[in-house]
Amino acid sequence: MKKIILFFIVVGSALVWIIFQNTNTQLQTQKNVFPVVDEVTDLEEDLQQKLLYPLTIESLRKGAYQGSDIVLEQTLAPGTNYKRYLTSYSSEGLKPYALLTVPTGTIPSSGWPVIIFNHGYIPPAQYKTTERYIAYVDSFARAGYIVFRPDYRGHGMSQGEPTGAYGSNGYTIDVLNAVSSIKRYDKADSNRIGMWGHSMGGHITLRNMVVSNDVKAGVIWAGIVASYPDLLNNWRRRITPRPTLPGGARRWREELVSQYGAPEKNPDFWNSISSNTYLTRISGPLQLHHGASDASVPVEFSQDLEKQMISAKRPVELYIYPNDDHNLSRSFSVAMQRSVVFFDTHVKNSN
């Protein structure tokens, strides 16, 4: 009887020991394969991929914009006190053209101050480098500035596809490379560069100024300068016949919402592609001009940007012109005079 009891004790102890070891092994195995760190890493990688979406400001800031030497393609008829050239440069392997004006007279020891001129929307197939904005360019050129007006890719003779300014960074990158190119030009002062933009060109100007530190001051007329959520919800241009553009140039709203959700569902992404989120990084002061009767771009866009600049503690001026239109046709002389004085203060006389 004692032998039987002893046998069961030994067998029971053995079973208990086996069960304990098996349980412990399972716990250790579960501990080793439980993917807490891996799951967090995957989430971080997913977030990083979203942040590096090409349209984000952080993605733009990580880019390299070497530009090139400026090639003088053709000498044009001169202005009152400046020479005019049709030129080209390099942007992402493409050859965009640009209008270049250079003051006559004695070159300052550091070179002439520069204004990069970002034009508004013109149907790319109808665009010509030497047409439109003639009075605008002339005003800055006569004031003693080199004016460099890039076409943007796909406009006129410029290589590439006209992808639009809102669903693609192509035009913004062309201007970043234009800045790098003018810095190489021997008659330009690379430390005195301002930027002017109208309408779509205002959108491009604002993006350039939160990406690069090369621009000392910006002037924007009737700018499309709202955040992307605001552009998505509060901006619809007048319905007018427009030429067919590549799909990405016209469907940016639908494509971004389909991929990343609406702004209220995914505010981080929409903020990441908005220049307005990064105003504390802006490279210089802004001067804003807008017609109160602008039927193309809401005056509220400029008003909101002024508030955002003030909140970011960055210098800003805003001029609203009653009863004036998208081109400030009635107030052109006053707006241009204010623009020149602003550039004189913050660019020409900044050294």
Image (cartoon, helix red, strand yellow):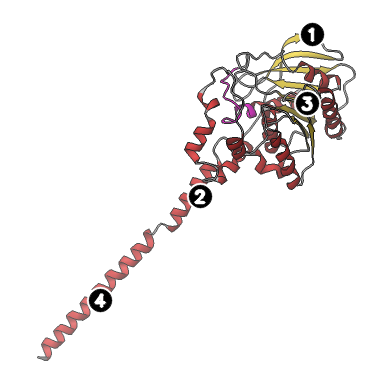
189 relative to 73, above or below: below
Q: Is residue 15 left or right of residue 153?
A: left
Residue 59 visible? The answer is: no
Q: Are marks 1 and 2 in contact (CB under 8 Å)?
A: no
- Amino acid carrying label 2: it is Glu
- SS at badge 4: helix
Instruction: Give the residues in magenta.
Output: 159-173
Which residue in the structure is indicated by mark 4? 17
Spatial separation of the CA atoms under disc 4 and disc 2: 43 Å
Q: Are marks 3 and 2 in contact (CB under 8 Å)?
A: no
**Classed neighbour count for the residue bearing mark 1: other residues with Cα under 10 Å, few (<14), some (14–19), many (≥20):** few
Spatial separation of the CA atoms under disc 3 and disc 1: 20 Å
Spatial separation of the CA atoms under disc 1 and disc 2: 57 Å
First-in-chain label (1 vs 2): 2
**Residue 77's disc number:** 1
- SS at badge 1: loop
Spatial separation of the CA atoms under disc 3 and disc 2: 41 Å
Between 267 and 140, the one nearer to me in the picture: 267
Which residue in the structure is indicated by mark 2? 44
**Classed neighbour count for the residue bearing mark 4: other residues with Cα under 10 Å, few (<14), some (14–19), many (≥20):** few
Which residue in the structure is indicated by mark 3? 115
251 relative to 18, above or below: above
